[in-house]
Image (spheres, rainbow, N blue to C red):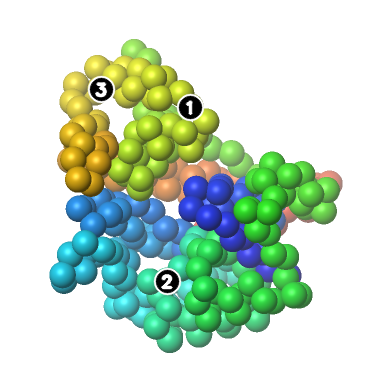
Amino acid sequence: MNYFITGRPGSGKSTLAAWLCSRLPQPAAGLRTLCTGRCEAGPVFSLQDLLTGEMAPISRPSPEGGRMVGIPETFEGFGTEALRRAAGSGAAVVLVDEVGRFERNCTSYLAQLQALVEGPQTVVAALKKEDLPHLNALRAREEDIQIDLDQISPAEARARLAARLPAPLHPGVSVRLYREDKVFGPGPMQLLELTARTGSLHSAAAAMGMAYSKAWKLLAGLEEQWGFALLERRPGGAKGGGSALTPKAWELLERYRAFEWETRRAAQRAFAAHFNDFPGFVFSFDRALFLC
């Protein structure tokens, strides 16, 4: 049985997908999408292979400018290989976050995704809410669990699923950086990521349920600790104002993401070594995933 999560942008698809993976046999293989830049046309996204940590861009400005277009070569090469690696990894769960429009004409990638969906592994996928054949086909699968976050809140979805998906014992790692006080962690990372996606600190704070004034205070404290600006304000005009990450903020985000991935991977490896055969419990970790 697979799980397909759809909903408007900002509805919580990725967060619910990550929560689902924590309730299913771990660790999950597959792909996740990260915002790795922003230009005049909008945010730039990349795919990350959950097994290797490697990343590749999937979007770029169109030749005429004004909009973002997909990079088919990434899906057909990097993306297809990552899904094949996930299929042969021994992982019981494959995360695909998200499935959207950029890959709509990438036949090799979509064929590999379809093979995963029809195979023995459980696929957890976040689906962009657009009227496209490959997305409609996934949403039409009645044998799988379909979750529309425009019809049900993430909290209600978790409550309904929790009873049928008791959480397995698993490691939890929260990566933070300190000087005198905490200077970076999951919260600041999410705030910067959402600001990069939306081009607006105000929108990012609202998506996190945080007051705009609190978001500015948080960033001001971080900037004082780091000694450099994280955001630059862009004045209004025909296209409106907003906020953009500085080059130093992008570098911090890139380094932190890599550090976080390696730390989580090390924790999973250590957990498999010390708890996989603990008597009285049934664990879902596959040692073979940690031999590389």
Q: At 67% across and 46% down in the image, what residue appears?
A: 153
In the picture, which quadrant includes the N terminus?
A: bottom right
Point out residue 264 in the picture as x, y percentages from the top left corner: 49, 45
Q: At 15% across and 70% down in the image, what residue appears?
A: 64
Q: Report which quarter residue 107 is drawn in.
A: bottom left
Most foreground residue, 95 or 151: 151
Dot 3 or dot 2, earlier in sequence: 2
Q: At 63% across and 65% down in the image, what residue appears?
A: 4
**How far is the residue under mark 1 from the one under mark 2?**
30 Å
Q: At 52% across and 31% down in the image, what residue appears?
A: 209
Amino acid at circle 3: Glu
Dot 1 or dot 2, earlier in sequence: 2
Q: Is residue 165 left or right of residue 210?
A: right
Q: Which residue is mark 3?
A: 223
Q: Which residue is mark 1?
A: 210
Q: Residues within 10 Å of mark 1 (few under 14, many from 20)?
A: some
Mark 1 secondary-structure assignment: loop
Q: Which residue is mark 2?
A: 101
Look at the picture and state if 202 lies above or below 60: above
Mark 3 or 2, closer to the camera: 2
Amino acid at circle 1: Met
**How far is the residue under mark 3 from the one under mark 1?**
19 Å
Amino acid at circle 2: Arg
Q: Is residue 229 left or right of residue 174?
A: left
